[in-house]
Amino acid sequence: MDVDEFELWEAEDAEEFSSSVAGDIGFIIDQALDARREAIIALPAEDFLLDAYARLAEGKRDWRHVMIVPTHDGIVAIDDPTSNVATLARIFMPKGARVLPLSAANDDYKRAAADADARLQALNWPFDLVVLTMDDDGGVIGLKQGPDIDEALTAADDRRCLGMLDDRGAEAISLSKRTITNARTLLLALSSPLQKAEAENAVEGDDGILARILADVAVPVDAHVVAAE
Amino acid sequence: MTDQPEGRAGRGRILLAEDDDSMRAFLERAIQRAGYDVVAVDRGTTALPHIAAGGFDLLLTDIVMPEMDGIELAQRAAALAPGMRVMFITGFAAVALSKDGGAPEGARVLSKPFHLRELTGEIERMLAA
């Protein structure tokens, strides 16, 4: 991506961060509702974003036409309290939003991902927004270093999500790079100055996972971060 | 990479009326970052005294707000400050655009921007017109 297309929003504190993230996402949802009377967005369910989501959920809009998908999830039942979809459902379903699970209990994470892909294929395309998070090892949402990462970043097929095994042995389902790079808008939510530095390096074109994703992104990207830990 | 200092004001003065707290705060920050002076209020009735006091180049308003909606606010604004431009942000754009929707002549509804850059671009185009 063009470096000029990366816009950094540094918040002074956690409250300003939550407000900025909620405002940015709310603006995009409302534009989508205005344009097509529906919005399809993908959200990670990290703890540091939950206050922003609570603020977002308080916004006045017709949530019945908003579809929310977790960006990634573990291989657990959808009603498992640790699942990302359960976290998002607790916040947004009372407002009337639809929340679509990626995961389901399944012994085979690849098969679970294929089932999730079939559900995503039924949605209108592309996503209006995908919110990305990073971990301190350079992983982006569920796309983490491990035996599946190269295939995940190079696959040219139409899969909208993939089964991922990371180097720590954790299995997950994650939106595919193709889903991310085709989204109408992208937003990066960063939880630390370290992640901010990693994101800036990625924009400059290092060889990390985020850089390999952003290399094929054609839309502006907003990045939100708290200025100090 | 864009990380400009905020408060680079002076390109124009904008009155923002938006009742969603998070969106109002974020839009205010984004418009300030683009170089405009912004006064942000959370409802139409609060916007009126600012309009009456004058000095704004643009009213940027949501449509659905408590006490006084954006359409009525725009109508009142047209009477109080005829030279001020009006732009609606988000929500029920079709109502605002319809012939009997009540929006004052010349008011603009954003043409579905999907990024704040397009919002600030629209503001720039409108103020330059």
Image: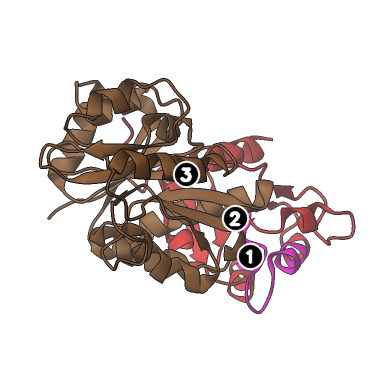
Question: CB under 8 Å between callouts 1 and 2?
Answer: yes
Q: What's the CA distance linking mark 3 and mark 1?
A: 35 Å
Of residues A140 and B129, the one drawn nearer to the viewer in this rendering: A140
Which chain, by letter, is red? Answer: B
Chain at numbered mark 1: B
Q: From the top left corner, tell me how far across and down residue A167 is, in percent.
A: 11, 37
**Which residue sits at x=56%, y=64%?**
B18
Give the mark, 1 or 2, whose residue is nearer the N terminus: 1
The disc label shown at residue B56, or none: 2
- What residue did someone put label 1 on? B51
Q: In the rendered image, which quarter is residue A114 located in?
A: top left
Q: Quadrant of residue B74?
A: bottom right
Camera-nearest label, 3 or 1: 3
Mark 3 on the same chain as mark 1: no
Residue B91 lies in quadrant: bottom right
- Under circle 2, the secondary element is loop
Residue count near mark 3 (Cα–Cα under 10 Å), binned few <14, some 14–19, many ≥20: many
How far, Cα to Cα, is label 3 from label 2?
33 Å
Classify the position of the C terminus of chain A by image quarter. bottom left
Q: Is A157 positioned to the left or the right of B110 in the image?
A: left
Q: Which mark is residue A129?
A: 3
Start-end of magenta stretch: B52-76
Badge count: 3
Q: In the rendered structure, which amino acid carries the disc numbered 1?
A: Ile
Q: Which chain is brown?
A: A
Q: What subunit carries mark 3?
A: A
Amino acid identity at mark 2:
Phe
